[in-house]
Image (cartoon, rainbow, N blue to C red):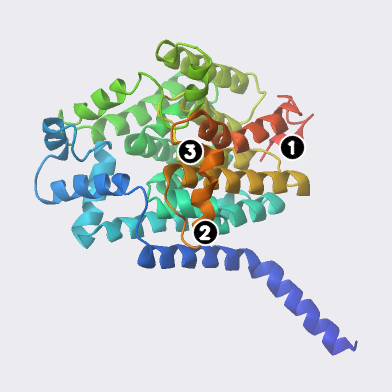
Amino acid sequence: MNATEIVSDYKLISFVKKYYLMAICVIGLLIRFILILSVSWMNASDLQNYFWAGDQVVRDQSAYRLWAQNLAGPRADVLPLELAILSLVVGVGRSPHALRGFFLLGDVLVLFLAYRLLADQPRRRALWLLLYALTPGPLYFFTLTPSDKPWILAGILAVLELSRNLHRPRFCALAIVSTGLLAAFKWFGLFFTFPIAWACGRQRIARLLMALAGVGLIFGVTHLLWFPDWMVVYQFRRMRFGLPFHSGLAVLLQALGLPMPLLYLPLMATSWIRVQYLYLRGRIRIHEAIVLSILSVLIWAPDTTAQMLFWLTLLMLLVTSWETPLWAGLIFFSTTWMTLMAAAAIGQVIPGLPLVDHLARLSGPYGGIRLALWSHLPLALLALRILSFGWRSHEEDPQLAI
């Protein structure tokens, strides 16, 4: 091999190293675009609800009031800020496909922000982007089953990126605004408001209270829209705190005989307080505190779906060390398997995989014990991975840090 060939090969390798992640993301987005154009959506009720609610606003109607008059019909189970955004999208497109395109933009933001956030963890970044862009989980749970989850994930990624520089006032202000907007969009920002406020306050009570007030102000102002019609959303959510359904951990605990309707709130509060304690003691950093604050609440919810559990898995993968070949293989296998189990239990065939329906013998019926077990497999593996290190300081255990 002469010098010219060596230089040429080196340039090729350098080009591949520089742009392969971009290629993965572009291919993943193209697949999503093709699916939106060529495949009718599955589990259409959520998308129909989004479109119905947004369309009512476009028609100068109160979607909340109409829903309250017919609780058995289409739902407006969204907060006022999200309803306003959905109505803007529907007003432009007047079609459910406009919403699917809007959710695709959320995927674009997720890939971009994850690329930036994990820049100092190149292996984890490559694996996470590959998992999100090309594996069946995100394609099924977020594209074939249209959802606002990509936008919520993008908001959390933005807060995680901003939280790197909370010692600087400008970044603190942006983090507080982002947290408040996310809380107003889908409540989730409320779960990690305290860690953000504590980091911005730098142990000064006045600053801590100002940060908390900033998030509360944004959350409250957005609720001026359609006041008080949106109360039906909170009434609907409160009614769900009965017997568990879908595929959450509560389904498994109920099967063991635990009185889950009495335990939801105590378990959520205890878990959330434990996370804040670990953060205040310095056992976890701000990134872990944000992710675990969300997990500590949603994992006990009575209506947690396989989609939500997959979404929580994506969050945990941001702050957990899983880059070794063994663990990467386990994560890719377990997330793909839970996706197949969810598709089989729901009874809808993934395009190109007609044999998925035959897996129903393994998945069991939707809402059953077996599907709940399969749906928790990736998170269980990650819990095992974390417990193998223990919650030690990051000087002792850098694997737990981003």
390 sits left or right of 164 in the view:
right
**Quick one: 7 or 73, which is closer to the camera?**
73
Residue 154 badge: none
Determine the residue positioned at 26% across, 46% down.
50
**Quick one: 165 or 331, which is closer to the camera?**
331
Q: Position of residue 230 (x, y in %)?
A: 20, 31
Q: Position of residue 160 (x, y in %)?
A: 53, 41
Q: Which comes before the other along the chain, label 1 or label 3?
A: 3
Q: Secondary structure at mark 2?
A: loop
Circle 1 or circle 2, nearest the eye: 2
Q: Quadrant of the N terminus?
A: bottom right
**Quick one: 217 or 227, which is closer to the camera?**
227
Q: Which residue in the structure is indicated by mark 1?
A: 399
Q: Which residue in the structure is indicated by mark 2?
A: 353
Q: CA distance from mark 1 to mark 2?
A: 37 Å
Q: CA distance from mark 2 to mark 3?
A: 19 Å
Q: Mark 2 packing: few (<14 Cα in 10 Å), some, or many (20+)? A: few
Q: Quadrant of the C terminus?
A: top right
Q: Which comes before the other along the chain, label 2 or label 3?
A: 3
Answer whether labels 2 and 3 touch (C-beta < 8 Å): no
Above or below, comparing residue 164 to residue 113 in the picture = above
Circle 2 or circle 3, nearest the eye: 2
Q: Position of residue 215 (x, y in %)?
A: 37, 30
- Residue type highlighted by circle 3: Ala
Q: Is residue 160 visible?
A: no
